[in-house]
Amino acid sequence: MVKKYDAIVIGGGVMGGSTAFQLSKKGYKVLVLEKDQLGGKASSAAAGMIGAQVELDPDSPMFHLACKSRKQFPELAVEIKDLTGIDIGFRKNGMLKIAFSNEERGKFLKIIESQQHLGEQVDWLTPEEVIKKEPLLSSSCNGAMYIEGGGQVSAPDFTMGLLKAAAALGTDSREYCEVKGFLREGNRVIGVSTNEGDFYSHSVVVTAGAWTTQLIQGSGLDLKGYPVKGESFSVLTNKPLLTHTIFSSSCYIVPKTSGRLIIGATVKPYSFSRSVSVEGITQLMEDAKFILPAIKEAEWEEAWAGTRPQSLDGLPYLGEHPEWSHLFIANGHFRNGILLSPITGMIMTDLIEGKKTITDVESFRIDRLTRQVK
Ligand code: FAD
Ligand code: GLY
């Protein structure tokens, strides 16, 4: 007899893990299909910053989505630890978004004012106050936006934690199983075809990261998404050089445990390449040395690259396919997929259940860039 799942999730990254976890918590039988290794792509390349303020425009609907998502981390950390024993490395170590020019300073001051009205814990620090918080930072900084509530996780542990927590609740997964197309009855999707045969389900969720646009093309939908390569590296230090995550327009430095620092990241649109270039790493090193001169003494650890999924208008796609029912898509989270993954899993579960979503998703409609306005 053919086994039928409640939901098939295509892609074993952080979005697939979060969606599978939320669905399995509700008792649904889920199958995650991953064409390579679980958690091996963008989600394990990420620095793990949970910082709504550092990379998002506060006027964007994504900012509000990010604030709601950020709130889920403390509970998720406990749930994952209880179900799997994995420590996702969740810490609220705070962030400093450094201004070097007067222009940046003016821009940050405006953002701080509007953020404070929204009740966010964001403050301006003078150069002297910055050095008090982080004595090893370059004295050439012109002040900083201090985001007390900003934090981090270990992105690879968080991603595998979600996938293993889903497995502990009954989710099946298959590695090296590539989805090639969708099975249909009329305009209703009933499963997927793969290199290992056909699998059937009530619903299908595409969380295939930067490969989603290509996969979904087979459904006649042009999702208007593209890959953006990002390179990073890490170093080890005997004594921790930083307490807070440092973010600047040129690079970021994220202090992990035991003196490890992650420095990222380059932004190269339209590239699926996972090679690490001398040019990319050299530039990041120069920028990091300028911000944190003491990093010169650090020991080299490793470098890597990942592929971020970006959409044409910078907003994620969250919703059901406009023409094929029971086919859902969560994609385009670009530089904030780790931060946005908890809320994304919850929204996809609401959509599959046909419920009102936990937060309004109109701005993230799948067909917003292709819809004909009548
Ligand atoms: P992925 O993790 O790429 O997962 C998609 C999966 O789908 C892959 O495993 C792929 O193999 C699989 N797949 C694709 N096609 C198929 C198919 N046909 N069949 C089966 N499987 C398929 N975000 C933050 O919030 N904070 C950060 O600090 C941060 N830092 C980053 C640093 C770097 C260098 C990079 C590159 C990204 C960073 N991001 C960060 C962004 C974040 O990593 C991404 O937005 C997020 O990981 C995207 O998750 P995903 O599950 O959509 O994609
Ligand atoms: N959010 C960090 C990055 O994408 O590089």
Image: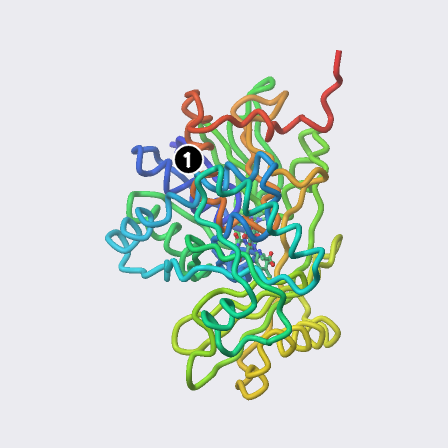
* Colour convention: rainbow
Residue at mark 1: 346
Q: Quadrant of the C terminus?
A: top right
Compare residues 107 and 354 and report the one nearer the observer. 107
- Look at the numbered disc 1 and give the secondary structure of its residue: helix
Find residue 349 and report its image quarter: top left
Left or right, residue 163 beside residue 143? left
Left or right, residue 156 beside residue 78? right
Left or right, residue 204 beside residue 142? left
| Residue 281 point in image, percent of width and height | 68, 74
Q: Quadrant of the N terminus?
A: top left
Q: Is residue 160 above or below residue 334?
A: below
| Residue 55 point in image, percent of width and height | 60, 51
The disc labelled 1 sits on which kind of residue? Met
Q: Is residue 93 above or below residue 33?
A: below
| Residue 74 point in image, percent of width and height | 32, 50
Q: Residue at x 49, y 38 (%)?
A: 117
Residue found farthest to the bottom:
297
Compare residues 203 and 373 and report the one nearer the observer. 373
Residue found farthest to the left:
82
| Residue 54 point in image, percent of width and height | 56, 53
Q: Counting other residues with Cα less than 10 Å from the Cα at mark 1, is it few (<14), some (14-19), or many (20 or more)? A: many
In this figure, what is the number of numbered marks?
A: 1
Q: Residue at x 55, y 83 (%)?
A: 294
Residue labelled 1 has its Cβ within 8 Å of some atom of ligand 1:
no
Q: Residue at x 55, y 68 (%)?
A: 253
